[in-house]
Amino acid sequence: MKKLLSPKSVRNIVGLLTQILGKKHCSTWELRFPEIPIKEQRYLNTAEMQQVVNAAKGQWRVLWATLAGTGTRISEAIGLHVGDVD
């Protein structure tokens, strides 16, 4: 049985082909893309996040507590300097 590509993969491949071939060659294509289903992102509730923070040790505990308390992304938290914290 053939495994079909996901709608996102199809869009990525067509986008890459468009970049390689140029819009001049692709402007006449009449494409209909499959719909991308909207899925709600799962997140940790307060109790689950508290379990993560409590299970962490050392500097990891501080990192998880910062993420949970501020809502920052991991890349934002990792980029913080001591002078950034007031």
Image: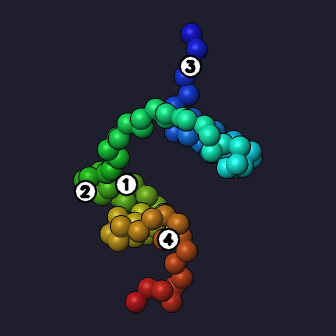
Mark 4: few/some/many CA within 10 Å (<14, 14-19, 20+): few
Q: Residue furthest right?
A: 20
Q: Is residue 3 above or below residue 67?
A: above
Secondary structure at badge 2 equals helix
Residue 58 can be seen in this image: no
Which amino acid type is marked by label 4?
A: Glu
Taking the spot 42% from the left edge, 35% from the top edge, the residue there is: 35
In the drawing, what numbered circle is on residue 46? 2
Taking the spot 54% from the left edge, 35% from the top edge, the residue there is: 31
Residue at label 1?
Answer: 52
Residue at label 4?
Answer: 76
Cα distance in 3D space between marks 2 and 4: 21 Å
Cα distance in 3D space between marks 1 and 2: 10 Å
Which amino acid type is marked by label 2?
A: Thr
First reached walking from the N terminus: tag 3 or tag 2: 3
Which amino acid type is marked by label 3?
A: Lys
Whole-percent x and y of residue 85?
Answer: 44, 85
Nearer the camera: disc 4 or disc 1: 4
